[in-house]
Image (cartoon, rainbow, N blue to C red):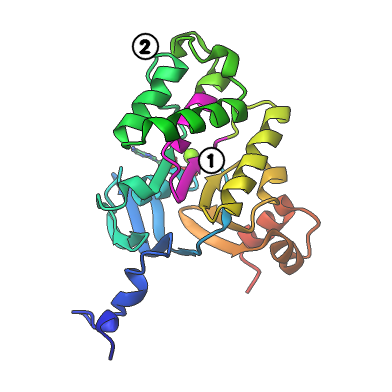
């Protein structure tokens, strides 16, 4: 037996600790005072995918992602992100997280926020300048880069938050509702950029309420009541559900008559 498969408990360690696997989740659980937000979640996300997590409000998407990035401690089960059991600190540089609630500093300008995030992640000056230019284009805020974030609209703050998440060019991205409050034209630009990240071998895990976005993902995971009720390429999910759109497919899988 190889070194990698010799686990103390007999389980296969190699698979869990494979540093190229973005997300591997076994019976992951989170309870808040008796409320089960994530219910024995089982999940594996392969590298290089655009993975869309969809499901109604309260289905546990944000809670799951917060556990993946180490902001919440699981009540049970385990999650491995890039081969490290979470919560852990090893992969900080390799992971980017954009929270659902915008997380930027209101008393700093857009430029200063991006600079601060770049410093936190030890991005070189040269890389910072190049990426800042590119990202300001993507979020369409070049003209406002010296405006204080407190003076921006909610959508603009959200876009700034995305740019800050991307400034260290991480290989794995968790984007929690990155396109909420972003107008349709700019959403197109965001998706072009997500495609560009994927083309550079990155893995993007995002949540969305927009079904027209979900169909653009390579793989969609449908969450309901803290569990993954179906997962697959959008086309395959629709075919399995005999549905013409993902919303109807979601309803099909929700009914649980898909055995
Ligand atoms: N910090 C918390 N304390 C108590 N309940 C929470 C907390 N965070 C989330 N929840 C609850 O957990 C469930 C899942 O929420 P969430 O993960 O935000 O779902 P989603 O992102 O899919 O909308 C909801 O019922 C929500 O109210
Ligand atoms: Mg959420």
Question: Is 229 or 85 nearer to us in this picture?
Answer: 85
Q: Is residue 133 above or below residue 210?
A: above
The answer to whether 5 appears left or right of 224 in the picture is left
Q: Farthest residue toward the bottom? A: 1
Q: Nearer the viewer, mark 2 or mark 1?
A: 2
Residue at 72 percent across and 29 percent down: it is 184
Tell whether position 32 is magenta: no
Q: Residues within 10 Å of mark 1 (few under 14, many from 20)?
A: few
What is the CA distance from the residue labelled 2 to the residue labelled 1? 31 Å
Image coordinates of residue 31 in percent, x first then y, are: 32, 50
Q: Farthest residue toward the left? A: 8
Residue 137: which numbered mark, if any?
none
Q: Label 2's element? A: loop
Tell whether position 171 is magenta: yes
The answer to whether 1 appears left or right of 219 in the picture is left
Task: Tell me the residue that label 2 is attached to.
Answer: 107
Quarter of the image with the C terminus is bottom right
Q: Confirm if mark 1 falls within 8 A of ligand 1.
A: yes
Q: Residues within 10 Å of mark 2 (few under 14, many from 20)?
A: few
Whether residue 75 is visible:
yes
The answer to whether 45 appears left or right of 37 in the picture is right
Q: Confirm if mark 2 falls within 8 A of ligand 1.
A: no
Q: Label 1's element? A: loop
Image coordinates of residue 91 in percent, x first then y, are: 31, 52
Tag 1 or tag 2, which sits nearer the N-term? Answer: 1
Quadrant of the image occupied by residue 138 = top right
Q: Which residues are magenta?
A: 158-178
Residue at 49 percent across and 9 percent down: it is 147
Image coordinates of residue 93 in percent, x first then y, are: 34, 46
Task: Tell me the residue that label 1 is attached to.
Answer: 57
Residue at 33 percent across and 52 percent down: it is 30
Q: Is residue 117 above or below residue 91?
A: above
């Amino acid at each position: 037996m190889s070194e990698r498969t010799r686990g103390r408990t007999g389980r296969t360690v190699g698979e869990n600790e494979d540093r190229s696997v973005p997300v591997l989740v076994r019976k992951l659980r989170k309870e808040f005072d008796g409320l089960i937000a994530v219910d024995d979640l089982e999940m594996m996300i392969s590298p290089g995918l655009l993975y869309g997590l969809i499901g109604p409000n309260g289905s546990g998407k944000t809670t799951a992602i917060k556990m993946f990035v180490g902001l919440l401690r699981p009540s049970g089960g385990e999650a491995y992100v890039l081969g490290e059991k979470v919560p852990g600190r090893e992969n900080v540089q390799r992971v980017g997280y954009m929270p659902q609630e915008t997380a930027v500093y209101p008393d700093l300008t857009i430029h200063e926020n991006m600079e601060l995030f770049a410093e936190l992640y030890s991005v070189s000056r040269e890389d910072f300048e190049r990426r800042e230019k590119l990202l300001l284009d993507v979020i369409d805020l070049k003209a406002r880069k010296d405006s204080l974030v407190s003076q921006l609209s909610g959508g603009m703050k959200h876009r700034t938050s995305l740019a800050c998440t991307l400034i260290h060019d991480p290989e794995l991205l968790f984007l929690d509702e990155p396109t909420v409050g972003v107008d349709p034209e700019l959403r197109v630009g965001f998706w072009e950029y997500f495609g560009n990240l994927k083309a550079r071998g990155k893995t993007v895990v995002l949540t969305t309420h927009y079904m027209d976005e979900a169909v653009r993902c390579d793989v969609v995971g449908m969450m309901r009541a803290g569990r993954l009720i179906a997962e697959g390429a959008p086309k395959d999910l629709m075919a399995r559900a005999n549905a013409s759109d993902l919303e109807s497919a979601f309803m099909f899988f929700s009914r649980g008559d898909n055995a």
